[in-house]
Image (tube, helix red, strand yellow):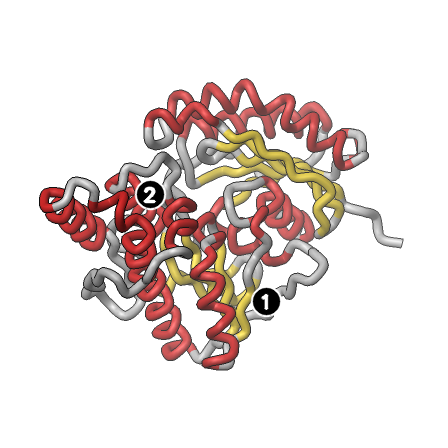
Amino acid sequence: MKKEVYILAIESSCDDTSAAVLKNDEVLSNVIANQEVHSKYGGVVPELASRAHQQNIVPVVQQAIERAGITKEQLSAIAFTRGPGLMGSLLVGTSFAKSLALGLNIPLIDVNHMQAHILAHFIKEEGCKIPPFPFICLTISGGHTQIVKITNHFEMEILGETIDDAVGEAYDKSAKILGLPYPGGPLVDKYAQQGNPKAYQFTQPKVGDLEFSFSGLKTQILYFIQKNVKENPNFIEENLYDICASIQYTIVEILMKKIKNAVKQTGIKDIAIAGGVSANSEIRKRLNEADKHWGWNTYIPKFQYTTDNAAMIAIAGYLKFLNNDYADISVAAKARLKVTE
């Protein structure tokens, strides 16, 4: 009988402190402490984020172990986010993971946050299909927009990425222009569902086949709102749903066009999405339609594994554990880390 592997994972790359326990590839617990402190600043304040991580990390880890119904002595290894992310936040998780691994005398496993978003697809969940190799993954979050070809668990190649802003920033900054609270992306999605996506037209950026650019679109939305508000001070209130629907339609059109280009270039029809923005309802809908229209096989993660969470760090840690791919105690957090590193 094979010995069960229990992985405790810690995720502290940005503004959520999370800890999870996996038994092999199944989630026993996934605890997330959100930081409310940033909403009044309209974005994440790094210094406040790292302080909040320091307050949250012990209770969050304790809760994850308790909810998993195990003791810390049963743990096989500790996995943690090495990067990319905010340096101060990463340091809290890295230091804690090192101390705990040393104290329990078990292996330490460093995880690339961007790889973990993709590997979340390998968490064993009822009703969720696991993508076969090779597959293409559209990784979309507040800090990243890229199309990645995945040949095996840890062999990844970036086919195309954003040359400026990430898609999450385009959502949040559009929301800010409309006077919506932070984080605005989910609100744009919510209001868009009640609006007409063809009400207003925004031009798509002219960049390479597999490249993205959102800074021009953001500027276009800003000028469009300023011009209309000048003519009618109530323009946003009277047309909020239609504005959100038109912004969302443009963004999703850009994303779908790039995936189509990637399928054409590689011949791979197994398509996955990952990252915080993959929780977006329109992207999910359009990908499901693509199955029928173009014969793709699409893989959409459960909502709880799209935003930053420790379960995705744990599955990446489990897969590295199976390869005996451990980190040295001298491993350092790295704020900038490519998905291929």
Instruction: Answer yes or no: is residue 235 visible.
Output: yes
Classed neighbour count for the residue bearing mark 2: other residues with Cα under 10 Å, few (<14), some (14–19), many (≥20): many
Classed neighbour count for the residue bearing mark 1: other residues with Cα under 10 Å, few (<14), some (14–19), many (≥20): many
In the rendered image of this protein, does residue 331 appear above or below residue 130?
above
Q: Nearer the viewer, residue 37 or 19?
A: 37
Per the image, the residue denoted by label 2 is 172
Q: Secondary structure at mark 2?
A: helix
Q: Residue at x 44, y 67 (%)?
A: 286
Q: Residue at x 62, y 44 (%)?
A: 311
| Position of the N terminus by quadrant | bottom right
In the rendered image of this protein, does residue 70 appear above or below residue 339?
above
Per the image, the residue denoted by label 1 is 131
Amino acid at circle 2: Asp
Q: Position of residue 90 (x, y in %)?
A: 47, 31
The mark that comes first in sequence, 1 or 2, is 1
Identify the image quadrant of residue 192: bottom left
Q: Is residue 311 left or right of residue 192?
A: right
Q: Is residue 124 left or right of residue 203?
A: right
Q: Position of residue 294 (x, y in %)?
A: 46, 81
Identify the image quadrant of residue 38: top left
Q: Position of residue 130 (x, y in %)?
A: 63, 64
Asked whether the residues under the numbered discs 1 and 2 touch, taking CB atoms below 8 Å apart as contact, a structural biologist would say: no
In the rendered image of this protein, does residue 79 appear above or below residue 275?
above
Q: Nearer the viewer, residue 266 or 123?
A: 123
Q: Residue at x 71, y 52 (%)?
A: 25
Q: Nearer the viewer, residue 252 or 273?
A: 252
Q: Secondary structure at mark 1?
A: loop
Q: Is residue 312 left or right of residue 206?
A: right
